[in-house]
Amino acid sequence: METQTATTNEEQNRQTYPFSLPPLGYDFDALAPFIDAETMELHHDKHHQTYVDKLNDALKDQADLQKHSIEELLAQIDSLPDAVKSAVRNNGGGHANHSMFWTIMEKNENGKPSGELAEAIDRDFGSFEDFKEKFNDAGVKQFGSGWVFLISNGSKLEIKSMPNQDTPLMQGVTPIMGNDVWEHAYYVTYRNRRPEYLKQWWNVVNWDEVQKRFEANNK
């Protein structure tokens, strides 16, 4: 697979119907051994593409909704027509969550946040190690499929786990980072060992991108 330029979160949020699969931005094996190439290919090319296809299918007869970005659609999820609400929640949420997910990963063994983000983590969680422990714990305790997110709630950072493809965007909050704890995100390498996957995932966090998202949320 040739390396492609990743779609930025801003560009993805501005997209309207028909939605499209953003390029991964790096080779399938770029995150190995922490996330294997087979998982990345299936996760991006199959799972995420399916969310996009089903989202577009749900909106094909909804001309009034087609002008909205995915961020806007999810922010008004409770007021969407019943005929499309579940599809937008599940598949639109999956599209938004994964579009973020690809951009916040690169191989960065033992990497750490810096600058204002590091200071905010220390302020709100005690230390980076305490933050990782609390984030991993939230991911382990998320029953079934779901995500664990870091959000900026006013001036405070918070960890929030959500089921299925739910996203803080449905509450008008843009997540700074998030980890996918659906089994399809880790099963090839880790089988049912979710705690091990969560522990190893810190080796592929793109802290520069997370920092950008933190700064954008705190303008």
Image (tube, rainbow, N blue to C red):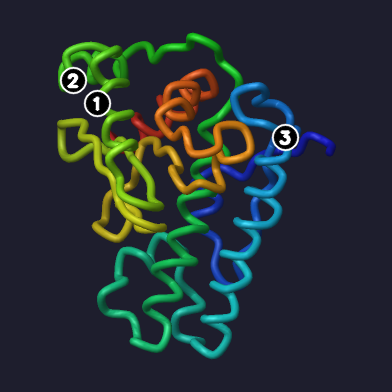
Which x, y percent locates residue 113? 39, 15
The disc at residue 134 is 1
Q: Which residue is mark 3?
A: 37
Of residue 47 and residue 205, the one placed in the foreground of this image is 47
Of residue 115 and residue 32, the one placed in the foreground of this image is 32
Q: Which residue is mark 2?
A: 125
| Disc 1 secondary structure class | helix
Q: Amino acid at mark 1?
A: Lys
- CA gap between label 1 and label 2 equals 8 Å
Quadrant of the rendered image containing residue 49 = bottom right
N-term-proximal mark, 1 vs 3? 3
- Whether residue 62 sits left or right of residue 213 in the image: it is right
Which x, y percent locates residue 205? 49, 24
- CA gap between label 1 and label 3 equals 28 Å
- CA gap between label 3 and label 2 equals 33 Å
Quadrant of the rendered image containing residue 213 = top left
- The reply to whether callout 1 and callout 2 are in contact (CB within 8 Å) is yes
- Whether residue 178 sits left or right of residue 77 in the image: it is right
Quarter of the picture containing the C terminus is top left
Residue at 45% x, 25% y is 196
